[in-house]
Image: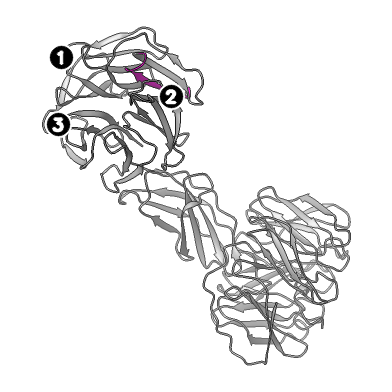
Amino acid sequence: MKFFKFFVGVSITVAIAAMLTVSISHAAAFNLLDFDGDGKTDVEVFRPSNGVWYVRYSATGEVAGFQWGNLLDIPVPGDYDGDGKADLAVFRPSNGTWFTVRSSGGATGVQWGNSLDRPVPGDYDGDGRTDIAVFRPSNGTWFIVNSSTGGAVGIQWGNAADTAVPGDYDGDGKTDTAVFRPSNGTWYIVYSSTGSAVGLQWGNSADVTVPADYDGDGKTDLAVYRPSNGVWYVRHSGSGAAIGFQWGNASDVPVPGDYDGDGRTDVAVFRPSNGTWFIVNSGTSAAVGIQWGNGRDIPASCPPPPSVAGFLGWTTAGLPSGSVNFFWGAATGIVDSYVVDVGTTPGGTGVRRLDVSGATFSVTVSDLPPGDYYARVRARNRCGISEPSNEALPPHVSGIYWTDAHANKIGRAYRDGTGVHDLITVGVDSPQGMALDLNGGTIYWAEPNPTSQTIRRADLNGGGVATFLDHVGPAALALDLNANKLYWADPFVTGNVRRVNLDGTHTEAVTAQFSSDSEGITLDLVHGKVYWTSRGGLNRIQRANLDGSVVDELISTGLDDPRGIALDVDRGLMYWAEAGGRKIRRANLDGTGEQDLVTVGLIHPCGIVLDLSSGYIYWTDFGTGKIQRASLDGTNVTDIVTGLGLPVGIAIR
């Protein structure tokens, strides 16, 4: 620990490089901030940028600086050794460790808690020493290590939306477990003297909790600070009287404490804009202003940041491809900024983190690859960061995926053709048909090379490439996510339609041998049908029940090398790419009403997929090396991706 000593009047102007990114909890009793043992609360701040505590001793007026902690630590001072003086202490969320420097001598490090816990130090066993304790919002449990015995206890009291407000509400010399519920403005307290529980309504969701002994009766009083009007609302435990006292403004941080040593808590605020403490001494009613600290310093008695009103939603309307706008309800209380985390899994982390002004309640995230995204928002002030909001329903960033049999890769782009990039380039050998499992976050593709005849798979983000099935002769794939099955057309090994469970078990033939040249397969899960195309000598389109029974020959004449096939079940239509005829065609699901849709500019169309929500057909053409699209009626043909090797399979999300 580094020690510095200053004289009054020295200017402190160091600014921190970044805000805290962890939660801080309100101290149980503000006399924990008496560093010189004179019975008065000392003015002090913790500077995250250098980990230094700057303390102004009330007994002598001297000032000192102690280096203890780092940028992401939470200050948790208390009298951990019971000598009547506050000890320097921090809680490190990254490893759940409490680091303490005892004023009586010696430093300790104790692991207790995790990164999402809120530290709630207090004297829970009444032995005159501060106990290490955390409140875990995820299950509403308090985990406490009693200093008198070293024993650990767990007490379930509260829920994820509650604010922990420990204090000695019954005056028995022990800290009581208590929470404030912003949704109804109620304090729920368990008295340590009797074990009984009470619920007392005091305050609202916009208030900042500031419990302390304002009337000097030895009991913690219910109290809130209302930033909107700068009023302190206190309910005296001794008389039951309710008082309101205006002191502060919306940007001030309430820092109550017994600054005059009369046994009663004084109302006080820290003003970040000028680093000044404004205190009203309860003994004389005199008001004082003390300049100590700057706008990025943290008073150790700083109240916890407010909760966010929850994610309200998201939109992609009017935004470029790959962009999503998230918006949320404003948090109440003191908010400097909002932290928005975006990820591809529930929990919303790992893709993007944005810091948004506290006066802003939305943010647009750009350049997201195709996929489903989760997000959550937290309020942050100079005291720390709140618990996450409710998670947004996952917005969907649409995209197309394709296989390139010549380049041996899987590609991806937005549906308008922007954002083209190679998704998978390793572990791919002549890929052809493909399918997407959006529920399981998996890409499947066929590799019908003579050596392995493999179906492979990977994560939708391209990671975790692995072999799914070997020696199965796949050409085209289709998924039944309702039954968790993968279907494929096998023109190379068995010459039939086959299927397997998505866990890799129970491979079975669905149809009898039908062709040595099948290239396309798709499913109608509404009517329980599987459709497939056969090229070569057969040139036909057929269908059967999903179990392979009742095979129907839909079209058996006039076809020239049919490949990929896709269905618009609601409109009763099927679409297919016809490589030999150099066409995109469609017909009714029963094979009647054949139509040519696109007949110009094609050389070898192969894979096909429908974007019914936007009204487009997409197809690959390994003769032109393009991915193209057209309206569902075949008009408005557009190049989407060009310059590919041999694009074959295609899928959309």
Q: Is residue 247 visible?
A: no
SS class, disc 1: loop
> From mark 3 to mark 2, how far is it between C-alphas?
34 Å
What range is drawn magenta here? 483-494
Rendered image: mark on residue 602 = 3
**Position of residue 402 in the picture relative to residue 173 (left or right):** left
Which is nearer the N-term, disc 1 or disc 3? Answer: 1
Say which of 166 and 46 sits in front.
46
The three-letter code of the residue at mark 3 reads: Leu
Locate the N terminus by quadrant: bottom right
Relative to residue 124, is residue 103 depicted above or below? below
> From mark 1 to mark 3, how far is it between C-alphas?
18 Å
Instruction: Tell me if label 1 and label 3 are in contact, CB under 8 Å.
Output: no
SS class, disc 3: loop
The three-letter code of the residue at mark 2 reads: Asp
Q: Position of residue 647 (x, y in %)?
A: 25, 34
Residue beneath disc 1: 558
Q: Is residue 312 visible?
A: yes
Quarter residue 583 falls in: top left
Which is nearer the N-term, disc 3 or disc 2? Answer: 2
Residue at x 68%, y 72% (from the top left corner): 300
Quarter residue 41 falls in: bottom right
Say which of 470 and 576 sits in front.
470
Instruction: Tell me if label 3 and label 2 are in contact, CB under 8 Å.
Output: no
Relative to residue 360, is residue 42 depicted above or below? below
Residue at x 25%, y 44% (from the top left corner): 417
**Residue situated furthest left in the rendering:** 600
Residue beneath disc 2: 470
Magenta stretch: includes residue 393: no
The three-letter code of the residue at mark 1 reads: Gly
